[in-house]
Image (tube, helix red, strand yellow):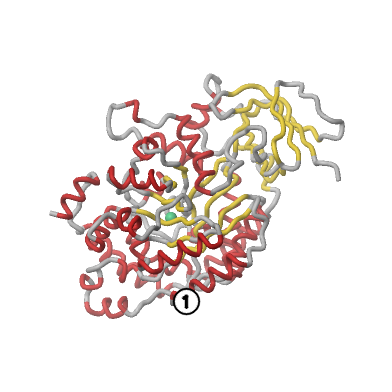
């Protein structure tokens, strides 16, 4: 069989150093095999694609998202902190059938592609426990969309009421007995589903891979975390968890374990190159150094951290400690979309809020590097995230007649700081065009829209009671967490001292 060849001519190609120049690219069987000056000689059978007046960049990679959030857009109120969100999060995944799980992932994938994102790490939750058919439905949605993804069942063995010591006692009597009666899925059931998922993976791992997502350390017993790490090693898959995302988590971690969350995870031998930590906001210097020494990767989620008021992750310090950092959007119900251009810009802007030490700011080039090659490390894919020979042909074509590229001086800076996804003209993933001229070619978006509205109406009705009680509890949980001895924008070190003293 002869190789499928495509030559892309006349585009301005952004290289790994952030320089843009007119180049031709030759693609064979989905991979870039040559990048050269215009006029690259190719075999007669190669398909020719014009990229005239386009900036070609590697597809952005979301290091952290939750596809189940797409069907829940608009269901999370304004002014909700992480723990308030988590109180109602159970409702969000309830009552869903396999078709709903597919639909939510398809909606998420469609938006990612539209916004120039070609791969993601998806922690997906099912209620009451993960299932092979549910995770397969999510993976199928990515396959049908033509994206790459790592799909991990998001799991725990504690409810939020069991996870946060003192919370139940802080609730009024009637709510306390209700909340105390809630429980997570039995551990054996959760692990047997995970084993089934990992042992029977039916998708091409060049495109879609499995992983495990023990959701939040406080929500997992020590044995649960140990078993997760063991299972991940056994099947050679990555792990991702939400680490020290909120100030309350960090403070309660100190109370529960007598040491930081990172210190506790290290003691459990949970830190490794297999692990990525989403958020990682409330860390001190020791924590960061331990993460660096253990090879843990970090998924930075600036838009979600802002939306939920979680704080600002110390990304510069992570980089100084040799940590591979990627960028993610988080779910569509915690950052209101899957816009990786926005997340990348915010990663850079947010690094500047602390003062005038401009050397410590993340440059446009650094932020872009995190959102491509950094995120690729979080996903564990070696050959994505850059336009270079031997890499997968995951390429986003941006229109250079968009206002923020006129006049054109610095394609990199103008793209990172000015692009919002509106200039995405064509998206190629593995050599296949999945989006072209404002149209998604792999999924029927008008059908998805009809199905989404129908599903939202049905699920809102089915979950109305759960949402109502969650809304009441959320206010109390928010007040409890705010009172964890550490109000205000405390630095981690001060937080530690305040909580210990
Ligand atoms: Zn998350």
Residue 328 horizontal/vertical position (percent): 47, 46
Left or right: residue 440 versus residue 355 is right
Q: Classify the position of the C terminus by image quarter.
A: bottom left
The answer to whether residue 165 shows anywhere in this view is: yes
- Give neighbour class at mark 1: few <14, some 14-19, many 20+ (Cα, 10 Å): few
Residue 240 horizontal/vertical position (percent): 46, 55
Please tell me whether mark 1 sits on a helix, a strand or a loop.
Answer: helix
Instruction: Classify 257 as above or below 495.
Output: below
Report which quarter residue 35 is drawn in: top right
- Name the residue rendered at 69%, 46% in the picture: 434
- Name the residue rendered at 27%, 59% in the picture: 253
Q: 286 and 40: which one is in front?
A: 286
Left or right: residue 407 versus residue 283 is right
Instruction: Classify 150 as above or below 35.
Output: below
Which residue was labeled with disc 1?
A: 188
User: Ligand 1 within 8 A of label 1's CB?
Assistant: no
Instruction: Classify 420 as above or below 52.
Output: below
Q: 240 and 79: which one is in front?
A: 240
Query: Which quarter is ligand 1 in?
Result: bottom left
Residue 263 horizontal/vertical position (percent): 30, 54
Instruction: Classify 206 as above or below 373.
Output: below
Left or right: residue 118 versus residue 233 is right
The answer to whether residue 461 shows anywhere in this view is: no
Left or right: residue 176 versus residue 15 is left
Residue 53 horizontal/vertical position (percent): 66, 26
- Name the residue rendered at 33%, 80% in the picture: 181
- Name the residue rendered at 35%, 55% in the picture: 266
């Amino acid at each position: 069989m002869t190789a499928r060849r495509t030559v892309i001519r006349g585009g301005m190609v952004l290289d790994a150093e952030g320089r843009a120049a007119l180049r031709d690219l030759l693609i064979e069987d989905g991979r870039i095999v040559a990048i050269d000056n215009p006029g690259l000689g190719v075999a007669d059978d190669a398909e020719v694609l014009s990229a005239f007046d386009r900036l070609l960049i590697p597809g952005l990679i979301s290091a952290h998202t939750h596809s189940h959030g797409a069907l829940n857009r608009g269901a999370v109120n304004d002014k909700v902190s992480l723990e308030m969100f988590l109180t109602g999060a159970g409702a969000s995944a309830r009552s869903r059938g396999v078709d709903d799980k597919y639909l939510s992932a398809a909606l998420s994938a469609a938006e990612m592609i539209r916004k120039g994102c070609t791969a993601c790490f998806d922690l997906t939750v099912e209620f009451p426990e993960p299932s092979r058919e549910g995770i397969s439905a999510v993976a199928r949605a990515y396959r049908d969309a033509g994206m790459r993804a790592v799909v991990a069942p998001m799991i725990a063995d504690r409810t939020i009421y069991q996870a946060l010591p003192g919370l139940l006692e802080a609730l009024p009597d009637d709510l306390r007995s209700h909340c105390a009666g809630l429980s997570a899925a039995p551990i054996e059931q959760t692990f047997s589903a995970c084993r089934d998922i990992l042992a029977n993976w039916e998708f091409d791992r060049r495109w879609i891979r499995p992983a495990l997502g023990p959701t939040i350390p406080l929500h997992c017993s020590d044995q649960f975390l140990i078993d997760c790490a063991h299972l991940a090693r056994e099947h050679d898959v990555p792990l991702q968890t939400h680490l020290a995302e909120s100030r309350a988590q960090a403070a309660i971690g100190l109370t529960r374990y007598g040491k930081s969350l990172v210190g506790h995870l290290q003691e459990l031998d949970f830190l490794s190159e297999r692990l990525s930590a989403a958020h990682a906001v409330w860390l001190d210097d020791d924590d960061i150094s331990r993460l660096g020494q253990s090879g843990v990767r970090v998924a930075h989620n600036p838009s979600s951290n802002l939306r939920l008021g979680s704080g600002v992750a110390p990304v510069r310090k992570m980089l100084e400690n040799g940590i591979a950092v990627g960028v993610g959007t988080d779910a569509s119900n915690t950052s209101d979309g899957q816009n990786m251009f926005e997340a990348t810009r915010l990663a850079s802007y947010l690094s500047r809020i602390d003062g005038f030490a401009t050397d410590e700011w993340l440059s446009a080039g650094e932020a872009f590097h995190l959102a491509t090659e950094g995120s690729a490390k979080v996903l564990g894919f070696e050959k994505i995230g850059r336009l270079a020979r031997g890499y997968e042909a995951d390429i986003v074509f941006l229109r250079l007649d968009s206002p923020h590229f006129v006049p054109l001086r610095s394609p990199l800076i103008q793209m990172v700081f000015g692009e919002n996804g509106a200039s995405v003209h064509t998206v190629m993933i593995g050599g296949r065009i999945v989006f072209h001229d404002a149209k998604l070619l792999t999924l029927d978006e008008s059908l998805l829209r009809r199905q989404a509205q129908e599903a939202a109406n049905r699920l809102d009705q089915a979950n109305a009671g759960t949402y109502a009680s969650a809304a009441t509890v959320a206010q109390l949980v928010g007040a409890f967490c705010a009172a964890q001895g550490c109000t205000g924008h405390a630095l981690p070190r001060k937080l530690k001292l305040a909580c210990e003293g």
